[in-house]
């Protein structure tokens, strides 16, 4: 999808469809390999898209500027058509996918309608009676909201954050758009009658004319929805719109009613000035800014946030849908930036949000007209309507525009929501219904806020089922990387059950952290001795303050049952959080912090071995003693001394440097050393620790080449070095001793291999 492409998270097709910013009734294509059409056919197909765009934008303008603001419909429609044309031009030419058709974002129409209605009521209450002036301010804020939404799209694309489409779960998105569908139905009745929503239903019960207008609106809307889903052909919707317009005028003429009479009765839009629509952009002159007040901004701000969120999510999911339908990668971030620029320009002109349209684009694909020209036809057609004047729209009945909105609403509220309730789990279906109801009854802003809140609760509720304990291992299975002599290993094998490693994962909060003390309580209640509890945070991504109580309960268990808590691999923030909490406790109850679980396990093993008086600090294990203990054959010290060089190291000194040629092996006679992997630009990684009686560097002797890791003294050490030259001399002068040494090396390598296998298995748990 992008340069150095990242995988784009994919949603189910129903999830993508729920937020498409275009008509749900345009036919979709199933393939993208249709042959290319000629110029004439491309223009014909593009004109269908142009007609659809003009009708949609006009319907949305009628939804937003209705009721008391209806006198400003000409200004609003002209501005929104102009903004759409500019946005469509930018997207058609700037998109990296030829044939992208732009469509007005239908959910934004509902958001803008609610925002304009609330603002208008506030302005009327403040004594501003001129509807044209109020509409000018509303149009200015609509354009500003669109421009801010475009800026947000551009920023998301610039920051390459296109994968953020997955932030909200599908039940919340589906429920929210179902609620918008209900508002579309109410808006469709509003457009069909020209009355505000609170007057439509009471008036419809008393006035036959309103009831007839609403009936015609619903009948045509249901017919559009039914036929477009049963007969998936491009000519269905244009034919229905044209036929309904012709039937209306035939009935009008049969009743001997002229256009003025039909308009006065509320059947037609207008009247519009019979001139080009572009000069009305003067309504967005700087004088409009003088009407902006803090009260207006306060009223509008929630809708601005809601629209920006809707626009971003809708476009991200639409682009994901384009990838699925076109069977090709789409650079989401590049498309976001192009759409952002288009919407900024659209907002400057007073338009409403417009972005990539999935159904319209796939319509071009199916008809073989997917080209820059095909995508530009809707732009050119809209511009032609603007230049010719909007009087052509006066011939289209109001109920036609309302029927488009009603068909959107019914499809969203009933068909999609019903399908979701059937396919989703019950709790997710309940969330979708709750969000839909809140959006419908409490408004788009409250619905979105409630949806986000439910999304957070849904995530927390589902995340609590993710086990935070990735592995629970005893010290008999899980040991440190320290290489110890055989007697020490025997003690650890018998006492290993007194060490318990709990490896945690994920994010810790109040709903899942309680699992840890419950598991520890179960362990100590099952019998046996627990001396050390190692809690590894290596795979923990974070922890909130509510999870701290779970660890306090663990420390209470430690006090009651006499074991020590060792914490390892904490991030800087979590370590600081624990240190602040530990200051309130007595020293004996405080947990100890270690850099890694390996260090914590080493500390526990050292304590167990110290109590067992194994490997005392002053013990010296020579190679002769090691040969005798491992092979059961006495070997004189003097017999080996002539082949060995003894080296004394202080703590921190380097015995072997990574990358140097391998020319010797070393036996640790006293002290301990650690093998470390040097990583340029990062701290070295401790691989393994060797104590007295262990060999280091022997693998490179047999493999040849250079050292793959450094070996550094952990404390003051005495080391016996056997060079390759000395080993060759031993093989010539004392073959029997060389044979014993080879057997000892084989046993050492076998033990290391078994230990490495054990550590690999431990990491996979």
Image (tube, rainbow, N blue to C red):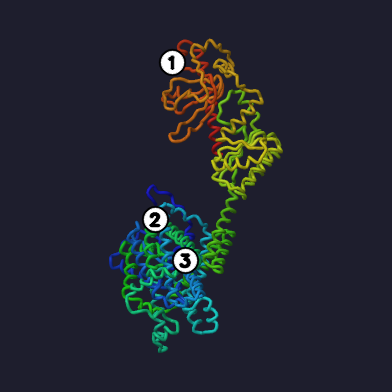
Give the crowd class for mark 3: few <14, some 14-19, many >=20 residues within 10 Å.
many
Provide the secondary structure element on which disc 2 rests.
loop
Q: Nearer the viewer, mark 1 or mark 2?
A: 1
Residue identified by numbered label 1: 725
Q: Residue 68, image x and y in percent?
A: 47, 77
The foreground one among 592 and 741 is 592
Residue that extends furthest to the bottom in the rendered view of this protein: 256
> Which mark is on residue 743?
none
Is residue 747 visible from the viewing direction of this image?
no
Q: Is residue 38 left or right of residue 594?
A: left
Q: Are marks 1 and 3 in contact (CB under 8 Å)?
A: no
Which one is earlier in the sequence, the residue at label 1 or at label 2?
2
Residue identified by numbered label 3: 107
Residue identified by numbered label 2: 327
Q: CA distance from mark 1 to mark 2?
A: 65 Å
The foreground one among 244 and 20 is 20
């Amino acid at each position: 999808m992008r340069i150095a492409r990242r995988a784009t998270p994919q949603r189910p097709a129903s999830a993508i469809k729920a937020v498409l910013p275009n008509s749900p009734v345009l036919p979709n294509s199933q393939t993208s390999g249709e042959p290319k059409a000629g110029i004439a056919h491309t223009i014909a197909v593009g004109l269908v898209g142009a007609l659809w765009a003009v009708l949609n934008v006009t319907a949305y303008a009628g939804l937003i500027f209705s009721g008391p603001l209806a006198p400003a419909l000409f200004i609003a429609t002209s501005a929104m058509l102009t903004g759409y044309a500019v946005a469509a031009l930018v997207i058609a030419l700037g998109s990296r996918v030829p044939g992208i058709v732009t469509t007005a974002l239908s959910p934004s129409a509902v958001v803008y309608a609610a925002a304009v209605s609330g603002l208008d009521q506030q302005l009327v209450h403040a004594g501003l009676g001129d509807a044209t002036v109020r509409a000018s301010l509303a149009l200015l804020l609509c354009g500003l909201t669109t421009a801010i939404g475009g800026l947000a799209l551009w920023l998301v694309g610039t920051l390459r954050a296109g994968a953020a489409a997955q932030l909200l779960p599908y039940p919340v998105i589906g429920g929210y758009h179902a609620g918008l569908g209900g508002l579309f139905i109410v808006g469709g009745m509003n457009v069909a009658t020209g009355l505000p929503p609170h007057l439509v239903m009471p008036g419809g019960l008393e006035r036959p004319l309103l009831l007839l207008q609403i009936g015609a609106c619903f009948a045509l809307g249901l017919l559009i929805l039914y036929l477009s889903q049963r007969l998936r052909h491009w000519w269905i919707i244009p034919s229905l719109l044209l036929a309904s317009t012709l039937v209306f005028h035939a009935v009008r003429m049969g009743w001997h009613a002229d256009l003025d009479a039909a308009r006065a009765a509320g059947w037609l839009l207008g009247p519009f000035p019979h001139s080009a629509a572009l000069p009305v952009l003067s309504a967005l002159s700087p004088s409009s800014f003088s009407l902006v007040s803090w009260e207006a901004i306060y009223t509008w701000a929630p809708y601005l946030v809601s629209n920006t969120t809707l626009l971003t999510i809708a476009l991200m999911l639409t682009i994901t849908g384009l990838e699925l339908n076109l069977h090709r990668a789409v650079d989401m971030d590049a498309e976001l930036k192009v759409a952002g620029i288009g919407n900024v320009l659209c907002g400057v002109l007073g338009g409403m949000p417009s972005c990539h349209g999935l159904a319209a684009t796939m319509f071009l694909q199916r008809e073989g007209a997917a080209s820059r020209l095909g995508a530009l036809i809707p732009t050119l057609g809209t511009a032609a309507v603007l230049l010719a004047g909007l009087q052509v729209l006066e011939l289209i009945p109001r109920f036609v525009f309302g029927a488009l909105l009603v068909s959107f609403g019914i499809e969203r509220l009933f068909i999609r929501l019903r399908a979701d309730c059937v396919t989703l789990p019950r709790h997710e279906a309940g969330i979708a219904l709750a969000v839909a109801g809140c959006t419908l009854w409490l408004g788009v802003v409250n619905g979105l806020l409630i949806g986000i809140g439910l999304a957070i609760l849904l995530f927390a509720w589902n995340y609590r089922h993710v086990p935070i304990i990735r592995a629970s291992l005893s010290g008999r299975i899980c040991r440190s990387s320290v290489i110890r002599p055989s007697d020490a290993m025997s003690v650890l094998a018998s006492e290993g059950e007194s060490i318990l490693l709990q490896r945690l994962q994920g994010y810790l909060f109040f709903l899942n952290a309680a699992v840890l003390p419950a598991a520890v309580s179960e362990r100590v209640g099952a019998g046996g001795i627990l001396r050390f509890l190692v809690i590894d945070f290596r795979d923990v991504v974070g922890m909130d303050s509510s999870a701290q109580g779970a660890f306090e309960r663990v420390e209470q268990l430690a006090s009651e049952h006499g074991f020590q808590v060792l914490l390892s691999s904490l991030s800087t923030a979590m370590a600081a959080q624990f240190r602040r909490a530990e200051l309130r406790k007595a020293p004996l109850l405080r947990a100890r912090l270690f850099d890694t679980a390996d260090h914590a396990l080493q500390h526990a093993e050292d304590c167990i071995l110290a109590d067992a008086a194994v490997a005392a600090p002053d013990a010296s294990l020579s190679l002769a003693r090691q040969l005798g203990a491992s092979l059961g054959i006495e070997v004189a010290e003097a017999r080996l001394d002539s082949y060995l060089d003894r080296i004394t190291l202080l703590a921190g000194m380097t015995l072997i440097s990574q990358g140097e040629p391998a020319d010797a092996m070393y036996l640790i006679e006293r002290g301990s050393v650690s093998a470390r992997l040097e990583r340029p630009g990062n701290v070295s990684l401790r691989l393994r620790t060797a104590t007295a009686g262990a060999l280091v560097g022997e693998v490179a002797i047999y493999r040849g080449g250079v050292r793959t890791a450094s070996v550094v003294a952990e404390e003051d050490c005495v080391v016996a070095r056997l060079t390759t030259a000395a080993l060759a001399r031993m093989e010539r002068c004392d073959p029997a001793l060389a044979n014993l040494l080879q057997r000892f090396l084989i046993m050492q390598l076998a033990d290391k291999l078994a230990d490495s296998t054990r550590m690999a298995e431990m990491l996979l748990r």
